[in-house]
């Protein structure tokens, strides 16, 4: 009965995606308190409840309509989708929005001594991975035949243990690879967190909330890097200053009383504002430069 009225979103219980997923929901205005079992949080000011699960379970929960929404990495999503196809199930999970966190890539990495001269070098080799379906698709698309060794974890030590010749695993900085004397040679999939949902039509109230949530998620994404810049400048320097403001649309120009040629310039910059930018602005004639964070934005 409640399920008719309230949305349920699946989020990773504890891991790399947890903090940023909850932060996103908070920024979208959701207040919640953790229930006794800690597995479910009830939204206090929106009809949106949060279910905490392993990230690998999120696609299935959405596929089976246990949850209306989910926050999961594209890597996990693609693997699950391909696994469903392989067993004859049609995946019904749709990506509503790609989010700007959880970025990583699924890559092929070889031991330092491996002679790699293009993808043909891995033909006939054994590749250890926890993503057998995504890897199989990559090999198929590149016309390469190789043996896939499916492991449930500790992929990076498989070559040293003699279980595989190379690996296909998630990389973000590459430090884990280096620590294991491996070197990245090809990207199989670029990944980031996705907001996913079931394509099943939702009752009116829930559908409305999904729409509102999407607008808010979009707003949150836009303000992450955005800054509000205020500065003073001689009118003659305006065109050069406008060129220096990163990702800003037409700035507001306000005359300053009793200063002759001087104006105040206000602009929203949608890209990161670096110290170097401020230095260039100053060199172009700007003074009294202020950079403020943007809290919310609604286009
Ligand atoms: P769970 O217990 O929920 O199954 P897990 O061990 O599978 O956790 P984490 O290591 O927390 O998962 O990673 C979750 C997701 O974070 C990955 O599926 C991927 O989308 C993303 N991610 C980002 N950077 C990395 C990285 N360097 N290594 C692994 N995952 C990364
Ligand atoms: Zn997992």
Image (cartoon, rainbow, N blue to C red):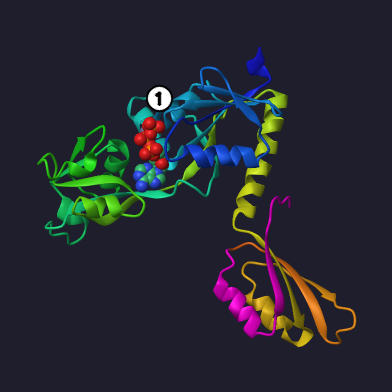
Question: Residue 119, position in %: x, y?
Answer: 21, 56
Furthest toward the right, the residue is 258
Identified at 12% across, 45% down, the residue is: 160
Identified at 11% across, 58% down, the residue is: 113
Furthest toward the left, the residue is 162
Crowd around label 1: few <14 · some 14–19 · many ≥20 (10 Å): few
Residue 294 sits inside the magenta stretch:
yes
263 left or right, relative to 97: right
Seen from the viewer's position, the closer of residues 267 and 23 is 23
Vertical placement of 167 versus 227: above or below? above
Split into quadrants, the picture shows ligand 1 in the one at top left
Identified at 89% across, 79% down, the residue is: 257
Can you see residue 155?
yes
Seen from the viewer's position, the closer of residues 177 and 129 is 177
Vertical placement of 275 versus 103: above or below? below
Furthest toward the top, the residue is 1
User: What element does badge 1 sit on?
Assistant: loop
Rendered-image quadrant of the N terminus: top right
Vertical placement of 256 versus 151: above or below? below
112 left or right, relative to 139: left
Question: Residue 277, position in %: x, y?
Answer: 59, 74
Question: Residue 107, position in %: x, y?
Answer: 30, 50
Residue 248 sits inside the magenta stretch:
no
Q: How many marks can you see?
A: 1
Identified at 63% across, 53% down, the residue is: 222
271 left or right, relative to 113: right
188 left or right, relative to 273: left
Q: Mark 1 points at which residue?
A: 89
Where are the magenta residues, as a range? 272-299
Seen from the viewer's position, the closer of residues 34 and 157 is 34
Question: Residue 231, position in %: x, y?
Answer: 73, 74
């Amino acid at each position: 009965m409640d399920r008719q009225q309230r949305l349920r979103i699946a989020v990773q219980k504890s891991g790399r995606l947890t903090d940023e997923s909850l932060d996103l929901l908070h920024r979208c205005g959701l207040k919640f308190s953790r229930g006794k079992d800690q597995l479910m949080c009830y939204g206090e000011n929106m009809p949106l409840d949060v279910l905490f699960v392993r990230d690998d379970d999120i696609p299935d929960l959405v596929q089976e309509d246990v949850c209306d929404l989910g926050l999961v990495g594209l890597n996990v999503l693609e693997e699950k989708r391909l696994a469903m196809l392989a067993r004859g199930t049609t995946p019904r999970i749709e990506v509503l929005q790609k989010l700007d966190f959880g970025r990583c890539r699924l890559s092929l990495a070889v031991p330092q001594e491996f002679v790699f001269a293009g993808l043909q070098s891995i033909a006939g080799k054994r590749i250890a991975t926890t993503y057998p379906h995504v890897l199989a698709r990559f090999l198929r698309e590149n016309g390469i035949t190789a043996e896939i060794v499916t492991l449930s974890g500790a992929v990076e030590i498989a070559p040293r243990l003699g279980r595989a010749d190379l690996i296909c695993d998630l990389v973000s900085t590459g430090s884990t690879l280096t620590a294991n004397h491996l070197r990245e040679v090809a990207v199989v999939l670029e990944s980031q967190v996705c907001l996913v949902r079931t394509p099943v039509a939702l009752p009116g109230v829930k559908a409305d909330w999904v729409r509102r949530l999407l607008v808010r998620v979009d707003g949150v994404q836009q303000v992450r890097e955005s800054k509000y810049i205020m500065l003073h400048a001689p009118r003659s320097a305006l065109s050069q200053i406008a060129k220096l403001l990163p990702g800003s649309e037409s700035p507001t120009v306000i005359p300053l009383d009793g200063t002759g040629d001087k104006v105040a310039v206000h602009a929203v910059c949608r890209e990161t504002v670096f110290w170097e930018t401020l230095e260039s602005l100053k060199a172009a004639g700007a003074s009294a430069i202020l950079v403020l964070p943007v809290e919310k934005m609604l286009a």
